[in-house]
Image (cartoon, coloured by chain):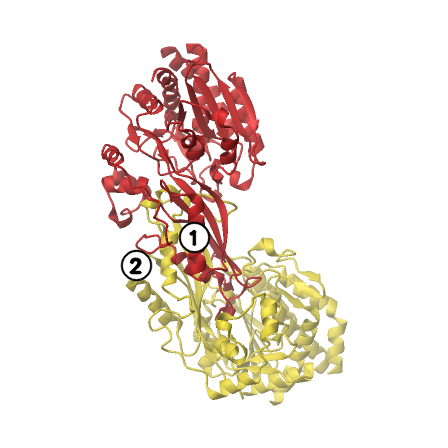
Chain colours: A yellow, B red
């Protein structure tokens, strides 16, 4: 693989330039921005690689870029996405979110870590393979969607409609990188999610706050309703919420024992004195990977500017996500939430479904897991950490679990400081080049795993 | 007074032009915008009237425009302010907030009702008096501040420093106008206020929401803390909060009996099906005027844009005002709130004092009340409604009650649809001209009341 590595070194400038061009497209799914532009760019890049590419839109959603190349006996499905999270709050970015900027050997831009960096380095690594190693020893099928950050709205239907396109011996997940101590990590599952917006309404317009004596205040109604969802001790109070949970197995828990928790480093990085309930070590990992959540992601009502304004708001909104573990189902959580709000007397509070996804798990001993793990070791000369699941979410259920396809994350440029979904999202440039090597070794390893 | 009225008719164009020039200055106290510009404009207009004018700044605050004219035996203090509320949310204005616009015989602009309309019509009415009736039969002292919308931050100190400037036989308050049925209203008291911002903090930056398993969420902390302040039944739970309340007297309650409640009209205007606890009629008025409040005026945390963003917020903020009735004190409420939050375990929640004011009441039989009332009857040919107090707040305590000066509102252009503090703030043009007559009759009546 020396030639492979030399090829990467020789083309670094163009590779970064291609990445930057993709990062400059503000393809924010939640705001409907520049989705066609990002989709076209990705399609063109895959075609440049020699792939056979189709754009497949389902129910009017953002098109999936589906591309295949290579003719080996094994098929590796590669899942990525070309959409990104909103960049707001813009004022907290050191440099503009959609103008990629290099500082301290890092690249700053919305989407560089989640997921345009991995997407591009995987394509470019395949280019390096073809240029230096000849034909691919495996068949590769890219599924690159444009709605990942809005709960993969139409991907479920795409998967149901095209089972033939998704047949594979293993799937490389979008995420991948190294942890806070520099160890490569491989994850073989994902949590599910249910995202909702709750809306309370009062008078038809904002009123002078002196009217609060007799006019209902939606900010209070929303506050009281939210307080019925989760107790200050963290217990989620929605009846039935915990019923479907499948606890971690003995093997899951043993896997956790092999993962260093790095509590102090994480606490320092987040700038907090302690984790919730002061959990530490393996118990923190267990809770992080095997427990569901109910999280206020956003709150807004009335006057939010500088200083004081004596206003009685006409509306209050909360954005809430529930992270789900096997075998919880998003549809069930949605029904339980509505029933709970109604039972508590909050029938007036509107609930908007902003998307849901099922949790998923994979066999820890599958060929794709072994190949990604071996490739990591060849790249970094250190044994990777295998996580039974991620704490994050993705459409792993419809893409993989529904067809029995094993799945693993890896061959990426993530690290603990990426600040994904937050201002100043970034990757370390060196991780980008190492992620390409990881991808190259994976092609080799998966052919024989 | 025929010549007085003819003079107004003859100068309507210039009068409106002067008002518009003042409205175009975005003197938003909470945002520190254009305060010197508005102050200079008001000073110049009073000097044009022949008043002797001083600008008096206390502790670096926005200057009070203090102006005197006339030599009659009685002194009428006139209190107004040249600052306005923030105009946000800007997108809800039909025409720009600081570009006064006439539609349907109304003037739309931030501050036109609160309080630049009354301020300007009172000055212009005095001009009409001087031009048609000769010398003023009373002495007038204007106190026009620039911090009314931020709880009159430095006016308390101004009043303590300058008792000599505030000696008067009565005070005309900034507010004044007609109710939903067209009846002129006179109010002889004001509620107090305490405004605070509560801030909960978590990680040093917004995190991916998957971390909510183990990382504290300030949006939840704030929600739980808020829910301890007020119960869903409306009862305020802060220990001692209600202790200092002086209940309405028999005379107060009798005064309420004379005021039509107009429940249906108010409900229709606000677009709500019922008042809190379905209160109606006199009981609604009693509650509105004689009970304190605890109001969430603003809430903000995390992602508040379109669609979904899976973020664990690093901060959550609530703006809260407490409206106070005699003999509650803002300093006491502040201490009670802090003690309550600490006792509930929310020592980590920061409390920012955004200003407080004492409640105040006046003698209902004072000369200024009689004069404002008589002048209203001369103007509108209908008996005005006398309110023992307003539900709103102002610095009536330091300006009037501290010196035993009786006070009444009136001689203004307010009406039920002004939307003060809200988008599309407006007055009816006809009310502006009628308010000037009310002011003219008041000069006459106060001289002999």
Mark 2 or 1, which is nearer the eye? 1
Residue B210 visible (yes or no): no
Say yes or no: labels 2 and 1 on the same chain.
no
Q: Which of the pair B442/B10 is nearer the observer?
A: B442
| Residue lying at 43% horizontally and 23% vertically, measured from the top left | B168
Q: Which residue is mark 1?
A: B337
CA neighbours of label 2 inside 10 A, class few (<14), some (14 to 19), many (20+): some
Secondary-structure class at tag 2 = loop
Q: Chain of mark 2?
A: A
Task: Estimate the x, y position of residue B100 in percent, counting from the top left.
Answer: 48, 31
Up-down: is B331 above or below A178?
A: above
Q: Which residue is mark 2?
A: A347
Up-down: is B4 above or below B389?
A: above
Task: Estimate the x, y position of residue B121 in percent, counting from the top left.
Answer: 43, 23
Measure the alpha-carbon separation of dots 2 and 1. Answer: 31 Å
| Residue lying at 58% horizontally and 80% vertically, measured from the top left | A186
- On residue A27, the disc is none
| Residue lying at 56% horizontally and 36% vertically, measured from the top left | B61
The part of the image, by quadrant, that contains residue A428 is bottom right
Please state, as top left, top right, bottom left or bottom right, where the N terminus of chain A lies in the image.
Answer: bottom right
Q: Which of the pair B94/A89 is nearer the observer?
A: A89
């Amino acid at each position: 693989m020396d030639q492979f590595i030399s090829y990467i070194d020789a083309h670094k400038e163009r590779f970064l330039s291609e990445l930057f061009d993709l990062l400059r497209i503000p393809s924010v799914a939640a705001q409907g921005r520049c989705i066609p532009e990002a989709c076209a760019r990705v399609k063109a890049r895959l075609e440049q690689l020699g792939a056979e590419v189709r754009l497949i839109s389902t129910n009017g959603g953002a098109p999936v870029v589906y591309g295949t190349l290579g003719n080996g006996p094994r098929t590796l499905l590669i899942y990525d996405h070309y959409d990104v999270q909103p960049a707001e709050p813009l004022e907290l970015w050191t440099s503009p979110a959609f103008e990629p900027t290099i500082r301290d050997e890092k690249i700053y831009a919305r989407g560089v870590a989640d997921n345009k960096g991995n997407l591009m380095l995987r394509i470019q690594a395949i280019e390096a393979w073809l240029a230096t190693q000849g034909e691919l020893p495996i068949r590769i099928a890219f599924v690159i969607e444009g709605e990942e950050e809005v709960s993969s709205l139409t991907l479920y239907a795409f998967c149901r409609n095209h089972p033939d396109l998704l047949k594979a011996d293993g799937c490389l997940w979008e995420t991948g990188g190294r942890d806070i101590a520099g160890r490569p990590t491989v994850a073989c599952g994902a949590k599910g999610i249910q995202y909702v917006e709750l809306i309370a309404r009062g008078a038809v317009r904002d009123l002078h706050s002196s009217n609060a004596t007799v006019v209902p205040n939606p900010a209070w109604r929303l506050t009281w309703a939210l307080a019925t969802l989760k107790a200050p001790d963290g217990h989620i109070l929605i009846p039935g919420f915990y019923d479907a949970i499948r606890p971690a197995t003995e093997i899951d828990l043993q896997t956790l024992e092999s993962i260093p928790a790095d509590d102090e480093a994480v606490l320092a990085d987040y700038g907090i004195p302690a984790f919730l309930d002061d959990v530490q070590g393996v118990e923190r990992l267990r809770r992080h990977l095997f427990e569901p959540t109910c999280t206020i992601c956003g709150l807004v009502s009335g006057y939010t500017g500088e200083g004081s304004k004596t206003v009685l708001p006409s509306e209050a909104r909360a954005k809430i996500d529930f992270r789900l573990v096997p075998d919880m189902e998003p549809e069930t959580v949605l029904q339980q939430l509505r029933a709970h709000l109604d039972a508590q007397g909050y029938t007036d509070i509107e609930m908007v479904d902003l998307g849901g996804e099922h949790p998923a798990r994979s066999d820890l001993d599958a060929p794709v897991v072994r190949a990604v793990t071996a490739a990591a070791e060849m790249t970094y000369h250190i044994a990777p950490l295998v996580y039974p699941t991620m704490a994050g979410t993705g459409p792993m259920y419809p893409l993989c679990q529904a067809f029995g396809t094993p799945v693993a994350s890896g061959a990426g440029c993530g690290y603990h400081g990426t600040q994904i979904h937050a201002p100043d999202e970034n990757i370390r440039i060196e991780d980008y080049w190492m992620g390409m090597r990881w991808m190259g070794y994976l092609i080799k390893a998966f052919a024989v795993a």
